[in-house]
Amino acid sequence: MQEFLAIATEAALAAGERLQTYYGQLASIQEKGRPGDLLTEADQASEATVIEILKRHYPEHGILAEESGPAGMMESPYLWAIDPLDGTTNFAHGYPFYAVSIALLVQGVPQVGVVFAPFMEELFCAAKGLGATCNGKPIQVSSTATLRESLLVTGFAYDRRETPDNNYAEFCYFTHLTQGVRRGGSASVDLAYVACGRLDGYWERGLSPWDLAAGVVLVEEAGGQVTAYDGSPFVLQSGRILASNGRLHQAMSAELQRVQPLTGWLAPAVL
Ligand code: IPD
Ligand code: CA
Ligand code: CA
């Protein structure tokens, strides 16, 4: 695991350095499909950097990268899930909350996770059984025990205008119950911040494996808990996650199951 972690770290640092050469000077920003789902030359350059390094070290592994899809030996038990720029909207606006996210899945289970936020110069690393670190120092989740004292984070998927299951109701609901709910704009950094105790809990839907896999290892190795909304085992392909410091988990799960979708002013038909 240590060697996998070292190579993932090498790739994340190199890709992060590449991202910084584009920050604040993007020549091309396109929409990928849905409104607001952006693609820039920085996403592509970062992804090429990560893939080149991983392929050089592990030509026999599979690769699942956000912009280029599956590659390499997809029948291998080892699969790298890569988000070359998690937080593209932030990046495109010059908002410095974004990261490179790299995870290694073994037989479908995330085992190694690296999240590098280059503007903040923060490197979060974790591997199963080895703990979690930020810039080499061990990290752990917060000890916040009540929603009333908590600071949470969430996000909204690009299909939010098309589905009533768009997380707006949950966002309002938890805003009412807590000290605040942040919308970071980078799922991997949101999870890294839960892992290091800056945030107490995170939930979101509509995500992809490359958004979540690395952050899940970080939270678990930092002593937190990761499940589906109802507390059942987390399924990476579901795109739906509840991650917390553990102490808040049951309360967050109960509230997520209680909340009703908003109707009326935010109904998709109106948009
Ligand atoms: C997005 C970010 C955001 C989340 C979106 C993701 P991208 O990833 O992680 O926080 O709310 O659902 O798709 O598109 O910037 O890689
Ligand atoms: Ca992403
Ligand atoms: Ca991305």
Image (tube, rainbow, N blue to C red):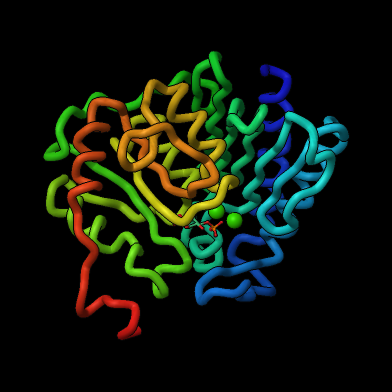
Q: Which residue is painted at 20% across and 51% down in the image?
A: 174
Task: Give the residue at x 79% y 41%.
Answer: 74
Foreground residue among 183 and 107 = 107
Indicate left or right for 92 with 269 as reference: right
Q: What is the count of numbered marks?
A: 0
- Left/right placement of residue 90 relative to residue 29 reads left
Q: Quadrant of the C terminus?
A: bottom left
Residue in front for this viewpoint, 46 or 165: 165
Q: Which of the 4 image quarters holds residue 225?
A: top left
Write the residue at 73% across / 30% down.
78
Q: Is residue 158 above or below residue 63?
A: below
Residue 223 drawn above or below residue 22: above
Q: Nearer the viewer, residue 194 or 79?
A: 79
Residue at the outermost bottom position:
270
Image quadrant in which the N terminus is located: top right
| Residue 231 x %, y % | 32, 34
Could you say where residue 220 lies in the image, as x and y percent from the top left?
A: 44, 25
Q: Is residue 125 above or below residue 214?
A: above
Residue 207 position within the rendered picture, expressed as x and y whole percent measured from the top left? 49, 53
**Residue 177: x and y, percent?**
13, 47
Residue drawn at point x = 53 percent, y = 32 percent? 124
